Image (spheres, helix red, strand yellow):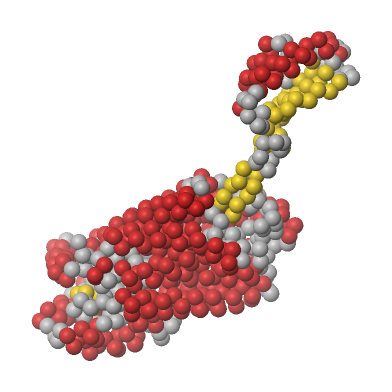
Amino acid sequence: MKLITAIIRPFKLDEVREALTEVGVSGITVTEVKGFGRQKGHTELYRGAEYVVDFLPKLKVECAVAEASLEAALEALANAARTGKVGDGKIFVQSLERTVRIRTGELDDDAL
Amino acid sequence: MNTIDPITVTSTKEGNHAVMHSQMDPRLRGDDSKLPAADNAAARQHAIATFRKPRLAGLAALLALATPALAFAQDAAAAAAPVANKGDVAWLLVCAALVIFMTLPGLALFYGGLVRSKNVLSVLIQTLIVFSLVAILWALYGYSLAFTPGNAFIGGFDRVFAKGLDATAMGATFTKGVYIPELVFFVFQGAFACITCALIIGAFAERVKFAGVLLFTVLWFTFAYTPMAHMVWFFPGPDAFTSNEAVPGVLAQSGFLFARGALDFAGGTVVHINAAIAGLVGSYVIGKRVGYGREAIKPHNLTQTMVGASILWVGWFGFNAGSALEANAVAAQAFVNTFLATAAAVLGWTAVEWLSKGKPSMLGAASGAVAGLVAITPAAGFVGLCGAIIIGALAGAVCLWGVNGLKRLLGADDALDVFGVHGVGGILGALLTGVFASPALGGAGIWDYVTETALPEYSIASQVWIQLQGVLVTVVVSGVVALVAFLIVKYTVGLRVSEESEREGLDITSHGESAYEN
């Protein structure tokens, strides 16, 4: 099992959800986050006061997938989240040791 | 149309008389005993504020000896019992409500949107409490100190505790023989006192101690606002100008700046420069906000600020046009000037900001509107439409500098730019009033109360010098009083909250509530 963590542009969420659903991912978790990467922030000017906004709002999408579905899920996610401009985000993949479905007690692949 | 074309003024005045008599309430006509007798009335007329100055009246005496028209005016004034024109009363009551609306909620929202969300309630309650406190002080002694006879710098105690201030008391306007109930004048001017004191809180917002605001307001209102209002606006009323020989005596009883001939239609010095200097001094004494210049201290809701600025604009029609004290052509002039100067200032600020900073901001446009309103205030009834547009456009551009270059130069954390907008705009407006009041530039010129006409002579240079004196007197009076008052507050109840409280926000730490979830 693998845990996919993707940082994406907020407005891409719907496309990412649809693409993941199509390749069989049955659930995702979304968190509003702020951060920085290669995409620069912007400046805001309030009368005489200028502020550089370094941290931009992004969404963190997490989903757990079986080894067999990993490549399909990564491809779907990347295609859906891509605009081709700096700031599209990143995808991280980690190994997942255990998964438990709380309601039934099912384990690992059965619980995905 | 030149609003003080002598022919127009005369005919309007006589027209008013005819209307007043034909429409007089029968009950009043049948119960003359309730009205003050003419002799008493003269004594009771608490000379009411003014803007038009009689500086050159003495000169007029030499030029145009006594005229039959003058004698007629005297007879008419002596014969007529002071009866208010219902149109004037209705108009001025609406104006008073509009000025109150400027503070609550106009100024409160304008300021509230500019602070961080953790401090918005503190600014709202400060606006509300200062307004309420000053309203009561106005009745207790403020009105008396500002608008009753005293010396050149402060009034007397005739109206302390609202003594004699009832529905029968009549006050003067700017036209001989035209009166308004003194209660109308009282509440209209009271609303000015309230907004002036409320303006100051923008300078020390987000770190001031609530009790400190209260004590400062009492001190500054008493020792800076009331004398300034008296110095600029108090005079014994137009009826006192019976002849050219009477002028020096009348001026001797008038406020210091009125007698010098300073022009301030609706409060550029008394309200805006006065409040701005107090705010600037306050921002020095209290010190910068924690994190100022290092952390992002951003407005939390510019929608509120836009709503507040718009309400200020609407309310300002009452503030400026109402300062004519009559529902007449001068009021219309002030109204239209308030309409145009503000629009020009929005364009002026936005254009310069767009060119110099790259983007035209909403906050800039809204700030431009306020800057234009401030700048046209002293000029409102004195200048023509083109003069108003030029004053507004310049105010927009210059006040943008006021909140940028000048602010950095001053080095004070004037949180909501009270000085940058109201001080810079007020000073600019006061000086430009001296320029554009010139009849040669479409202005109204100098009003001679003796003949009730505008004088043909006008010197821009000497008027601007007089305007500058008005500005300097205001800066000194407000600056000194504010400094002493802030130091008294600092060493008694305290001026500033603890750093911990400031970081958490005044809403929670000073008032035990928060505006929004999260």
User: In terms of image quadrants, where is residue B92?
Assistant: bottom left
Query: Looking at this view, is B230 or B355 the one in front?
Result: B355
Residue A74 image position (x, y, % from top left): 74, 17
Q: Where residue B220 appears, x then y in whole percent?
A: 54, 73
The vertical placement of A19 against B156, above or below, is above
* Residue B354 in sight here: yes
> Which quadrant is the C terminus of chain A positioned in?
top right
Side of A6 where B416 appears, left or right: left
Front-most of B190 and A14?
A14
Query: Between residues B199 and B394, which one lies in front from this camera angle?
Result: B394
Q: Residue at x 60, y 52 (%)?
A: A50
Q: How many marks?
A: 0
Residue at position x 65%, y 32% in the image: A86
Q: From the viewer's perspective, is B290 left or right of B459?
A: right
Which residue shows up at 33% across the image and 77% down it?
B461
Q: Residue at x 73, y 60 (%)?
A: B499
Q: What percent of the width, then of the height, locates residue B284?
A: 62, 69
Q: Quadrant of the N terminus of chain A?
A: top right
Residue B322's x, y, as percent? 33, 62
Q: Is residue B259 left or right of residue B140?
A: left
Indicate the quadrant where residue B415 lies: bottom right
Q: Residue furthest left?
A: B68
Horizontally, residue A88 falls left or right of residue B304, namely right
